[in-house]
Amino acid sequence: MLKRYAGWWLAAPATLAVLVFLILPVAATIATTFGEDGGIFAPYVAFFNSGFRRTVLWRTIEISLATTAISLVVGFLTAYVVSKSPGKLKSLLIIAAVFPLLTGVVVRSFAWLIILGKNGILNNFLVSIGAISEPLSMLYTQGSVIVAMVYLFVPLMILTLVGVLENIPDDVVQASASLGATPAGTFRQVILPLAVPGLIVGAVLVFTGSFTAYATPQLLGGERQMVMGTLMYQRAMVSFDWVGASTIAAIMVVITVTVVLAMSRIARRLNPMAT
Amino acid sequence: MMTSRINPLLILFTVLVYIFLMGPLIIVLGASVSDTTYLTFPPQGLTLRWFENIFAISAFKRTIITSLELAFLATGLALLIGIPAAYALNRYRIKLPTWLSTVFVLPILVPEIVLGFSLLKSVAVGMQTPIFLTLLVGHMLLVLPYCVRVVSASLASFDFSIEEAAVSLGSPPMKTFFTIVLPNVRSGVIAAFILAFITSINDVSTSLFLTGPGVSTLPIQILAHVEQFFDPTIASVSVLLMLLTVAVMAIVERTLGLTFLAK
């Protein structure tokens, strides 16, 4: 008996841990949003009826889309140069991307607090060169949140895409060149389409990461630029509105899962190497 | 030779991107040694007093210890249950249903902040568990997917016929696992440990709802401190965390080679 089910026994502790401490609690959180008075969808009706909460949802989507788009372009161009760099330089460039990635979210967001603050480095610099006469308020704007989020996710994008670009077979690129394509033509018509599945994976990571972020919007957006993560915390720990917080949690889960599933489907369909 | 064909504008762009990546961290480093009571760059004067100040603030001392304990225990537990799971998923691939491997992807699909909140409701409040224990459960789940996936990836290239050979020559299964299988996937286990450890140390979203009176983690303490004070202490704590990153990268370099991280 023991031998026959050895695989099950070995996988059981980890499976049970995920079941008991992840699936059940998250399911319970989502379930509490459906048991309310005033109809099964009452908390959701309340969420979407509140102009403020709708604004927060749209702001979060806007910030996440902007972060994803900028990170994609910056990450892809940089990854292209990194993947084409000679050996030693390439390892150095990879190390320089890994370092910020492994340094925590709080540290990296805090850095932008020093840079963008009213008496921050950027304001002092701009005043000292005479570009502006009064310090600008750059903190607690949508822009400051997006800059810090892009800073957070560009290293991840570079590393994901370097891996993808390295996997593009050299002979495909050479074939394109020997058939007369210009380097720019090869880039557009061969490398870019082959990188699409990787770009989608990167985009999903960045979008879901920004959509559910807490520390960065809290530090650089504060109360003025509330997003889903900070609103959820405020609902739960300041207003003690647990149903409201659970509703936000459920919306986050639904959007995350939908984006992941839809995009992985699209990635499979767009993969030119798939048969 | 390929390098010469890259558009110079693209190279300039890449240089700017790397300045963008490194600049803020260099600014934090500079601000941490500035002999001023406010955060500034380039540093004015040179002092290490902000580093001393970290240990003068008991909340920092306490949370640094909590974060280290948490990272070691959570990673240890996740490996303890994750390695057998990864082994089972590879060794008994045909016998086990495919959904089983999907189970270990689920923690990635669930936003960390939702996991933290749900654990607060169901475990901390629902089961009245102590704060540290709930944090430990949260962090273990946070790092479990890394452990299973990374160890699984290195088991995927392990030739299980070596293990069968040992067993058929009379080696008991447990002994075979520790003397034959585990040494062969050592680099995967080290990589999993390091990724998990650094993820746990830096985590904000899972811990957010799970810290309470007396028990907090370093990143949560930093967030709380920044809202009240804006002195270079936070910059020096940040430098400590960066030094930890350097240490982690040095270990990876020694054991696996840093190119591992680009995969």
Image (tube, coloured by chain):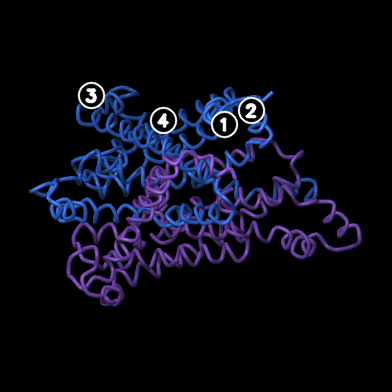
Chain colours: A blue, B purple
Q: Position of residue B230 (x, y in %)?
A: 20, 62
Please name the residue shown 76% across and 38% down the image.
B94
Residue with the mark numbered 3: A49
Type of amino acid at the residue the image marks with label 1:
Ile
- Give the spatial CA distance, label 4 vs label 2: 40 Å
Alpha carbons under labels 1 and 3: distance apart:
46 Å
Residue under numbered circle 4 = A255
Q: Are marks 4 and 2 on the same chain?
A: yes
Tag of residue B222: none
- Label 1 resides on the chain identified as A
- Whether the residues at callouts 2 and 3 have beta carbons within 8 Å, the answer is no
Which residue is under mark 1?
A191
The relative height of residue B28 versus residue B90 in the rendered view (above or below) is below
Position of A275 with respect to B37 (left or right) is right
Dot 1 crowding, Cα within 10 Å, few <14, some 14–19, many 20+: some
Chain of the residue where label 4 is placed in the rendered structure? A
Mark 4, residues whose alpha carbon is within 10 Å: few (<14), some, or many (≥20)?
A: few
**Which residue occupies 42% across, 55% down?**
A100
